[in-house]
Image (tube, rainbow, N blue to C red):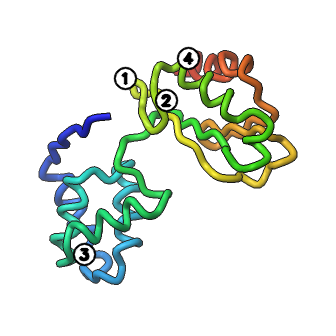
């Protein structure tokens, strides 16, 4: 997926600066700052990382390193209904890969991408602690257990109808 340049408005830049200031522009608070910024904007594109780095007086490479190291952070916008397929051992053994392939086919997106309409995004995660329900899929905060590829259309239909 090619990188899209994000044009930040003045009010967005001011919000990022305010968040940094709320942590006293302390570089030791980088992770907390990034959490707060991501919860405000939904993701952390390069342009946002540059402002955070400037405000905390640290290299952009350090911010980028933290963003890419921790799986909680994302540099890509997530869909209105983020879909996460568990690929932990139990889910994988019970067919999570086939379920993932079916979601990709139905939504016509690759792992880590968001549909053009912004409704869905797909990601994988490791173990949600519901191994007895493997394979497990999360759509937002809703958990689906024992998911088979033929269930994917019905799961997506729930969210198409609610929009």
SS assignment at label 1:
loop
Q: Residue 43, relative to residue 28: is it above or below?
A: above
Viewport quadrant of the N terminus: top left
- Evaluate if marks 4 and 1 touch, with contact meaning CB atoms under 8 Å apart: no
Q: Nearer the viewer, mark 3 or mark 2?
A: 2
Q: On the rendered structure, is 64 left or right of 110?
A: left
Separation of disc 3 and disc 2 at Cα? 33 Å
Q: Are marks 4 and 2 in contact (CB under 8 Å)?
A: no
Q: Earlier in the sequence, mark 3 or mark 1?
A: 3
Callout 2 secondary element? strand
The alpha-carbon separation of the residues under discs 4 and 3 comes to 44 Å
The tag earlier along the polypeptide, 4 or 2, is 4
Q: Label 4: state its secondary structure.
A: helix
Name which residue lies at 68% across and 37% down.
137
User: Residue visible at 40% across and 71% down?
Assistant: 31
Tell me the residue that label 4 is attached to: 106
User: Residue 120, which numbered label?
Assistant: 2
* Marked residue nearer the N-terminal end (4 or 3): 3
| Residue at image coords 49%, 57% | 71
As drawn, the label of residue 90 is none
- Quickly name the residue at label 3: 21
* Mark 1 lies on residue: 116
**Residue placed most toward the observer, 107 or 20:** 107
Q: How busy is the neighbourhood of tag 3: few (under 14 within 10 Å), some, or many (20 plus)? A: some
Of the residues under marks 3 and 2, which one precedes in the sequence? 3
Q: Nearer the viewer, residue 117 or 91?
A: 91
Which callout, 4 or 1, points to the residue nearer the camera? 4
| Percent x, y of residue 150 | 73, 17
Q: Is residue 23 left or right of residue 14?
A: right
Please tell me whether mark 3 or mark 1 is closer to you in this view: 1
């Amino acid at each position: 997926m090619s990188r899209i340049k994000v044009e930040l408005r003045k009010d967005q830049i001011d919000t990022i600066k305010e968040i940094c200031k709320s942590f006293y522009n302390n570089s030791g608070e980088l992770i907390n700052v990034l959490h707060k910024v991501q919860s405000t904007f939904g993701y952390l594109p390069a342009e946002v990382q540059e402002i955070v780095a400037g405000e905390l007086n640290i290299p952009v490479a350090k911010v980028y390193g933290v963003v890419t190291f921790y799986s909680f952070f994302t540099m890509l916008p997530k869909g209105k209904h983020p879909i996460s397929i568990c690929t932990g051992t139990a889910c994988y053994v019970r067919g999570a890969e086939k379920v993932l392939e079916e979601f990709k086919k139905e939504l016509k997106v690759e792992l880590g991408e968001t549909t053009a309409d912004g409704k869905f995004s797909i990601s994988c995660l490791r173990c949600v602690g519901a191994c007895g329900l493997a394979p497990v899929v999360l759509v937002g905060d809703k958990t689906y257990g024992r998911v088979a590829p033929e269930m994917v259309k019905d799961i997506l239909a729930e969210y198409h109808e609610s929009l």
